[in-house]
Amino acid sequence: MVIPARLAATRLPDKPLADIHGEPMIVHVWRRAMAAGLGPVLVAAGDRPIVAAIEKAGGVAILTDPELPRGTDRVWAALREVDPERRHDAVVNVQGDLPTIDPAVIRVALAPLADPAVDIATLATEITRPDERTNPNVVKAVAGFRDGAKVARALYFTRATAPSGDGPLYHHIGLYAFRRAALDRFVALPPGVLERRESLEQLRALEAGMRIDVALVDTVPLGVDTPDDLARARAMLAPRSS
């Protein structure tokens, strides 16, 4: 499992190091990834202070090129350095701004890779708030979940309200599990036409004919992007009084 993180952020500068009850946010994410019990956890850091924070907590971090454009590229670079023998044939990319994520949700992300035809696995949850159906900041996973099914093949991802007609819409959660070979292929691909149009990198994989399956979970984990989000995370993680 690899957690990419860097300090550059416009809405919440230095957010991986934001204090949440005495520990940096990235340490909270690392602890939850460790609790998932899926194997070794590595932080792919774009900056030395992130490495220092993880090492102080007892974790493993590696410094990657701060100019890498996306977290996926950072994950791939870190894996090449720490596992050149390719002992690990799959990797879960956990975003570094999810300090409240349930470890069980991380485990669900790996489940679709049980099907050897699947290249990449990701998560979604059914949209329940009417305003999210039309909100372009809520990315929709277009997949045909049959009755009772918890996994379906992704046909598209979009910021638009899709698909049309009666039935549920699904809020995509940007946590991915890659087969190692699929990750190698993905980072070598040029940006796709639809990826640039929608600003969604997963469309690069679909345009190239790669298969992405989506697993359903109950809720969207809190992503920390703003000071208000940070305040919510602090409230959710506040120590309980005895």
Image: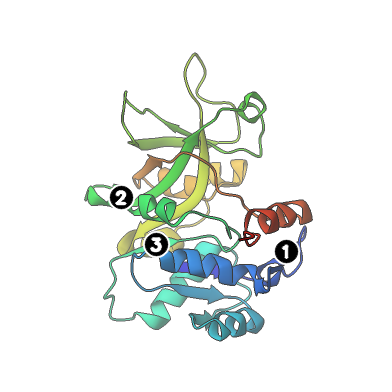
Whether tag 3 and tag 2 are in contact, CB under 8 A, the answer is no
Q: Position of residue 117 (x, y in %)?
A: 24, 47
**Residue flagged by tag 1: what amino acid is it?**
Ala
Q: Position of residue 74 (x, y in %)?
A: 52, 70
Along the line of sight, the residue nearer the viewer: 105 or 179: 105
- Residue at left offset 62%, top offset 52%: 223
- Mark earlier in primary sequence (3, 1): 1
Q: CA distance from mark 3 to mark 2?
A: 13 Å
- Which numbered disc, 3 or 1, marks the residue closer to the eye? 3
- Mark earlier in primary sequence (3, 2): 3
Along the line of sight, the residue nearer the viewer: 227 or 239: 239
Q: Position of residue 162 (x, y in %)?
A: 53, 26
Looking at the image, can residue 117 be seen? yes
Residue assigned mark 1: 9
Using residue 54 as the reference point, say whether residue 91 is left or right of it: left
Position of 13 relative to 190 (above/below)? below
Regarding mark 1 in the picture, which secondary structure is present there?
loop
- Residue at left offset 34%, top offset 54%: 110
Using residue 122 as the reference point, say whether residue 64 is left or right of it: right
Q: CA distance from mark 2 to mark 1?
A: 31 Å
**Residue flagged by tag 2: what amino acid is it?**
Ala
Q: Position of residue 172 (x, y in %)?
A: 51, 41
Which label was assigned to residue 36?
3
Which label was assigned to residue 111?
2
Which label was assigned to residue 223?
none
Position of 181 relative to 52 (above/below)? above
User: Dot 2, how many residues are within 10 Å of its Cα: few (below 14), some (14-19), or many (20+)?
Assistant: some
Looking at the image, can residue 1 be seen? no
Corner quadrant of residue 149 = top left
